[in-house]
């Protein structure tokens, strides 16, 4: 395991530049997406009104639109606005599919109770995604296996999965390495509850807490594992760099940290997302 790494930009102060600090606060992606859909709807209504006016005035004809053509108009307009407002590329597809999904769902006449249940389940799973910009999606066994290989043999090594979801990663570590104290912290209530119940049922020694990893002191851990999102990686690095002890490991599945090359990279499976590992200086 390489142990000689020095970050390329080590020595730079870990503060945001005053330029960045004075930037006006941007909308959260979901808020912007909602505003773009509303703006597109206003645009569609405007286009309908204008074309009907022109048809009536100049051709003395009544213009009608099919539901699907209106859907397409809304889809194209909102996806284009997503490009203009520089939303992440997946938002363009979400914008495009959204109006079609609404029409299809309305035609299926799904009972209202089902909407309510789906809303409650989705809200509990993705409760905080709006704020954290980190949705829930689980890691997988090949990843856990590689993480276990990085855990030193000495007893009382402490590992934490920050954003532990359903808890699989920490429970796997606890089972494979009884010498390691495996923990998880999760901000969304439903996944946290599921991880708690599963740990009890499996008699796992892994411990899970409900909370925000930003409130932890990373100095308490030898290994911090993160499977989060690009939106939080820079802030995570700042926290890790300030708090983590020398020689401890920060491991990020899939997401790199701009300007901070990892000490080494592991590919759990050909073609799968990589594990980026930073050994703290
Ligand atoms: C991509 S999932 C990863 C789940 C799990 N670590 C795994 O490997 O299967 C990210 C999780 O982080 C949680 N999360 C996001 N921000 C968080 C925060 N600030 N504190 C604690 N959990 C957070 C989300 O609710 C989500 O469940």
Image: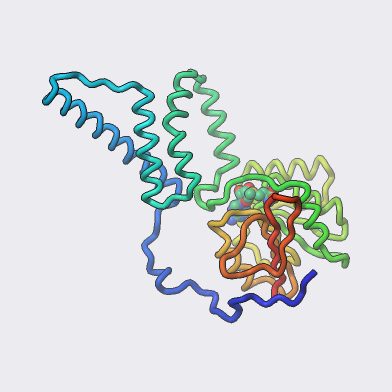
Q: Position of residue 168 (x, y in %)?
A: 75, 46
Q: Residue at x 38, y 69 (%)?
A: 22
Number of numbered discs overlaid on the protein picture: 0
Classify 188 as above or below 116. Answer: below
Classify 60 as above or below 223. Answer: above
Q: Quadrant of residue 250?
A: bottom right
Position of the C terminus, as image quadrant, is bottom right
Q: Residue at x 40, y 48 (%)?
A: 83
Query: Residue 227 vs residue 53: left or right?
Result: right
Q: Quadrant of residue 106?
A: top left
Query: Residue 57 vs residue 255: left or right?
Result: left
Classify 271 as above or below 221. Answer: above
Q: Quadrant of residue 73?
A: top left
Q: Position of residue 242 (x, y in %)?
A: 62, 73
Front-most of residues 215 and 23? 23
Q: Position of residue 30 (x, y in %)?
A: 45, 46
Q: Position of residue 153 (x, y in %)?
A: 88, 65
Position of the N terminus, as image quadrant, is bottom right
Q: Residue at x 71, y 64 (%)?
A: 277
Q: Residue at x 38, y 29 (%)?
A: 71
């Amino acid at each position: 395991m390489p142990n000689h790494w020095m970050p390329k930009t080590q020595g730079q102060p870990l503060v945001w530049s005053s330029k960045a600090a004075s930037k006006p606060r941007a909308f959260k992606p979901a808020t912007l997406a909602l505003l773009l859909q509303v703006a597109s709807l206003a645009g569609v209504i405007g286009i309908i009104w204008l074309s009907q006016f022109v048809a009536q005035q100049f051709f003395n004809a009544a213009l009608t639109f099919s539901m699907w053509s209106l859907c397409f108009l809304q889809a194209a307009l909102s996806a284009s606005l997503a490009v203009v407002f520089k939303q992440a590329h997946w938002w363009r597809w979400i914008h495009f599919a959204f109006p079609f999904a609404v029409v299809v769902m309305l035609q299926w006449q799904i009972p209202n109770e089902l909407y309510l249940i789906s809303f409650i389940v989705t809200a509990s799973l993705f409760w905080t995604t709006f704020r954290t910009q980190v949705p829930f999606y689980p890691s997988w066994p090949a990843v856990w296996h590689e993480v276990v290989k990085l855990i030193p043999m000495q007893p009382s090594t402490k590992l934490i999965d920050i954003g532990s979801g359903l808890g699989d990663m920490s429970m796997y570590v606890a089972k494979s390495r009884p010498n390691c104290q495996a923990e998880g912290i999760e901000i969304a209530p439903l996944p946290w509850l599921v991880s708690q119940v599963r740990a009890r049922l499996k008699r796992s020694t892994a411990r899970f807490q409900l909370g925000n990893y930003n409130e932890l002191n990373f100095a308490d851990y030898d290994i911090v594992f993160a499977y989060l999102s690009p939106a939080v990686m820079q802030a995570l690095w700042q926290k890790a760099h300030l708090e983590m002890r020398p020689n401890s490991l920060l491991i990020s599945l899939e997401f790199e940290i701009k300007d901070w090359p990892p000490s080494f990279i592991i590919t759990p499976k050909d073609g799968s997302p990589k594990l980026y590992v930073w050994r703290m200086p």
